[in-house]
Amino acid sequence: MKVFHGRMDGKPSEQRGPTFTGVVWADPVMPTTDNVTINTVFFSPGARTFWHTHDAGQVLQVTGGSGWICVDGSEPQPIRQGDVVWIGPGERHWHGADASSYLVHLAISIGKADWQEEVSEADYARARSGRPAVDANAGAGR
């Protein structure tokens, strides 16, 4: 057993670079332990990951703002505070903030990430073409 108290002591937030579009910050929560890494990630409006996969999957828990998750070959899906997303092993995807909102999520990554090419403006425009949908049942059970 290992206990990690809040964010990692003495570890500053890291501005992410070559595998992200826009301004993205990550706050390490748990260093890679038994092939699992946990970070809190802040995306400025319009910022997003590049296309990527995870060896054994990834869980995203959205803690603030709104944004998008897109699996290759599918339409982008809106995500917002309170949502939890499971991305299966090897599932090629991207995620990031809406054009008019920041996005904060806890990322629990299992196994190594395989970073690929930048998400094209055309692919991101598919998400930008509409505001994240407001669920009529929002708040029910939350």
Image (cartoon, grey):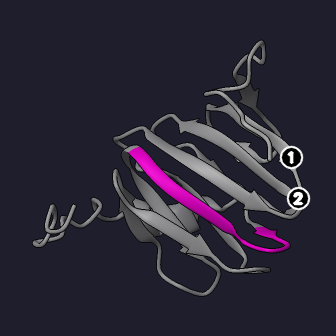
Q: Secondary structure at mark 1?
A: strand
Q: Position of residue 135 (x, y in %)?
A: 18, 70
Q: Position of residue 29 (x, y in %)?
A: 68, 35
Q: Position of residue 34 (x, y in %)?
A: 89, 56
Q: Residues within 10 Å of mark 1 (few under 14, many from 20)?
A: some
Name the foreground residue: 70 vs 121.
Answer: 70
Residue in view at x 65 percent, y 62 percent: 120
Q: Is residue 82 left or right of residue 11?
A: left
Q: Secondary structure at mark 2?
A: loop
Q: Residues within 10 Å of mark 2 (few under 14, many from 20)?
A: few
Quadrant in the rendering for residue 88 = bottom right
What label sits on residue 96 in the rendered view?
A: none
Specify the segment rendered in magenta: 53-63
Q: Which residue is mark 1?
A: 32
Q: Is residue 61 magenta?
A: yes
Q: Which residue is mark 2?
A: 35
Name the foreground residue: 96 vs 109.
Answer: 109
Q: Are marks 1 and 2 in contact (CB under 8 Å)?
A: yes
Q: Is residue 25 left or right of residue 122?
A: right
Q: Is residue 138 magenta?
A: no
